[in-house]
Image (cartoon, rainbow, N blue to C red):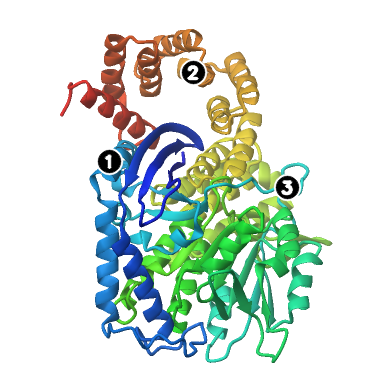
């Protein structure tokens, strides 16, 4: 289940304030609550922001080489010789502004209540900041106390108006050809060591992705790479110099005397084609590149995920950021969380370069469906089997990543199981005899790693168990639950369908839940009907009927939903989700006393160790607090 907040600033500026701010809470991309607030004028923030930007551009805050060529800019009138103090004043003023009563009471207080009800400070979630004037993107929004208190969230800059990007159609749910392809562009490297960026890319993705490096291209060469490659790119990375003014930004792509820069407008056609063919992430590891994101929006293009810099950034800090970012992405962190962790890593530079950790910025539209790096390719290895070659089990399983077993015992077990799997595949008799014995062992190892929060290892053993015994449904079910936790909807759906085909009744209930989350109600109802036809146990029947009630609740068919939830409870009295949903129905129908009874039973039967039940607990507690029934 994904959580996100969308904070819309509306019309206003720092001198007039923002009188009409909206805060929106979304659960699985469906709006659940909406709030209103405002922010007062803050001219002092505007003044300090401009002074800090001047200090950065004048190079007074550090003597480290920066990814911008600092020229004489007439900024000698800056009287501050202590950039740390200026940035401290800016940060404190920004934080004080965002703690104003009208903003806290209307927006932040409600956000905090929702997060606390859905898992507390350890919960991962996105905060989209929708801003009409891109100048306000440059403010240090990281100073917001809310972001500081919740370490697993990140503020994502977004335009206030946007459209969803059109994507090239695929067949059979296959990924676009751009999946796993990264184009790495090294631009003007005067005074920079861009080889460090390339090494970080190779270290994190070299064994799983198709990387292409181009150094100091001409404008035409860069445009050709974006518009003429048939497969195109999933990630476009640029490292080098860049600059901007109040009108637009540009990349300094080579060190020639002419034809050495490009703008977004020049690359517009190539970028539009790349987005259509699957470009999901654009990283501009260069100074003041935030303006390029604004230029892309102004040019009418749908915004892919963009990681840009809102100010000049010293070269070695830029190295540290991408090294950390790529490391987290290779470990399957969601993009927003990988950015947050990589920015936190830069805090060690704050004493030397004030505001270092707040320079990288993630820009993205709320319509973006997420960066998927889970199924990237590895180099294939093969073993001779008779007169043909059999692809290795490691290749079939794929995506072993950086959290692969890192001790001798885990490696030994993994390799042993793989060799046994290959051996079993060679003869039908050994497969029939040993497959049913070894598959549960592999599945159990997967479950243990799953419990220890090692998703890549768990996935590897679940897939191995299903390979050893093709009729074994349980590893498919476990794999589906793991993919669901990783927000890999496609992988979860595919694995759960395999579990259904192998006759696991619980999977029918779970697959309907996955369809409901994707708002595919007709497909969910078909799965529920199949479940009710074949399920032998009351618990499975109750889960399917509860899911049918969930659909009816979402479709505002409250009477039918009430019947389903009561039927499910009649089959299994201790179903916390059924009580939770029934309480919501009673609240909606204006029956608070009946709702109260079911909120209490929700807490009684829920287990906090189960994420979805823990959510039920927090929701119930929130309603009971409002009614004064618990502290």
What is the secondary structure assignment of the residue under circle 1? helix
Query: Can you identify the residue that label 3 sits on?
Result: 174
State if disc 3 and disc 2 touch (CB < 8 Å): no
Point out the tag, 3 or 1, that comes first from the N-terminus: 1
Horizontal side of 230 relative to 371 (left or right) equals right
- Measured along the vertical axis of the image, is residue 226 above or below residue 495? below
Question: Compared with residue 514, is residue 307 higher up or lower down, i.e. above or below?
Answer: below
How dense is the environment of label 2, judged by Cα within 10 Å: few (below 14), some, or many (20 and up)? many
Of the two numbered discs 2 and 3 in the rendering, the one whose residue sits closer to the viewer: 2
Front residue of 110/575: it is: 110
The answer, for residue 523, to whether it is visible in the render is: yes
* Residue at the (34%, 40%) spot, across then down: 37
- Alpha-carbon distance for marks 3 and 1? 43 Å
Q: Position of residue 39 (x, y in %)?
A: 32, 48
Would you identify the image quadrant in which residue 57 lies? bottom left
How far across and how far down the image is residue 197, in percent?
A: 54, 79
354 or 596, nearer to the observer: 354
């Amino acid at each position: 289940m994904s959580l996100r907040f969308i904070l819309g600033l509306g019309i206003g500026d720092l001198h007039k304030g923002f009188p009409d701010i909206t805060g929106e809470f979304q659960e699985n991309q469906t709006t659940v609550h909406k709030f209103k607030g405002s922010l007062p004028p803050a001219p002092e923030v505007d003044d300090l922001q401009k002074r800090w930007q001047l200090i950065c551009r004048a190079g007074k805050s550090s003597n480290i080489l920066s990814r911008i060529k600092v020229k004489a800019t007439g900024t000698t009138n800056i009287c501050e010789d202590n950039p740390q103090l200026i940035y401290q004043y800016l940060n404190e003023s920004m934080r004080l502004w965002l703690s104003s009563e009208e903003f806290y009471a209307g927006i932040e207080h409600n956000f905090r209540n929702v997060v606390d009800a859905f898992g507390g400070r350890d919960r991962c979630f996105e905060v989209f900041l929708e801003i009409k004037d891109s100048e306000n993107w440059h403010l240090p929004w990281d100073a917001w106390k809310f972001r500081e208190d919740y370490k697993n969230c990140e503020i994502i800059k977004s335009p206030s108006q946007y459209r969803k990007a059109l994507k090239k159609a695929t067949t059979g749910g296959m990924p676009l050809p751009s999946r796993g392809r990264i184009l790495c562009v090294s631009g003007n490297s005067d005074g920079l060591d861009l080889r460090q960026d390339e090494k970080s890319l190779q270290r994190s993705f070299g064994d799983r992705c198709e990387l292409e490096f181009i150094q100091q291209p001409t404008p035409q060469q860069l445009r050709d790479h974006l518009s003429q490659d048939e497969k195109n790119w999933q990630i476009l990375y640029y490292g080098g110099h860049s600059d901007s003014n109040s009108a637009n930004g540009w990349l300094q792509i080579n060190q020639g005397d002419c034809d050495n820069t490009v703008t977004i407008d020049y690359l517009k056609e190539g970028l539009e084609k790349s987005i259509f063919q699957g470009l999901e992430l654009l990283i501009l590891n260069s100074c003041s590149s935030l303006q390029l994101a604004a230029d892309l929006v102004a040019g009418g293009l749908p915004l892919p995920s963009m990681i840009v810099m809102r100010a000049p950034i010293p070269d070695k800090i830029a190295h540290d950021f991408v090294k950390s970012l790529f490391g987290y992405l290779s470990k399957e962190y969601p993009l927003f969380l990988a950015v947050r962790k990589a920015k936190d890593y830069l805090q060690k530079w704050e004493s030397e370069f004030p505001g270092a950790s707040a320079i990288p910025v993630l820009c993205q539209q709320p319509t973006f469906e997420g960066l998927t790096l889970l199924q990237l390719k590895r180099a294939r290895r093969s073993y001779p089997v008779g007169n043909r070659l059999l692809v290795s089990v490691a290749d079939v399983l794929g995506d072993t990543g950086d959290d692969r077993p890192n001790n001798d015992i885990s490696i030994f077990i993994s390799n042993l199981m793989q060799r046994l799997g290959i051996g079993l595949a060679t003869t039908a008799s050994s497969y029939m005899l040993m497959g049913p014995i070894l598959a549960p062992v592999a599945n159990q190892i997967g479950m243990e790693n799953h419990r220890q929060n090692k998703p890549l290892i768990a996935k590897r053993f679940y897939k191995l168990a299903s390979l050893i015994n093709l009729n074994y449904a349980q590893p498919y079910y476990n794999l589906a639950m793991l993919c669901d936790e990783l927000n890999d909807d496609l992988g979860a759906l595919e694995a759960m369908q395999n579990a259904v085909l192998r006759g696991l009744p619980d999977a029918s209930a779970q697959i309907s839940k996955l369809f409901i989350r994707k708002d595919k109600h007709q497909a969910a109802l078909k799965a529920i009907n199949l479940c009710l036809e074949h399920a032998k146990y009351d618990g499975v029947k109750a889960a399917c009927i509860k899911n049918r009630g969930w659909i009816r609740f979402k479709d505002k068919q409250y009477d039918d939903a009430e019947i389903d939830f009561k039927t499910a409870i009649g089959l299994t009295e201790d179903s916390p989700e059924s009580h939770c949903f029934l309480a919501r129905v009673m609240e909606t129908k204006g029956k608070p006393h009946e709702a109260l009874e079911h909120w209490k039973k929700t807490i009684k039967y829920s287990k906090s160790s189960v994420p979805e039940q823990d959510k039920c607990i927090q929701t119930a507690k929130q309603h009971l607090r409002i009614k004064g029934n618990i502290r």
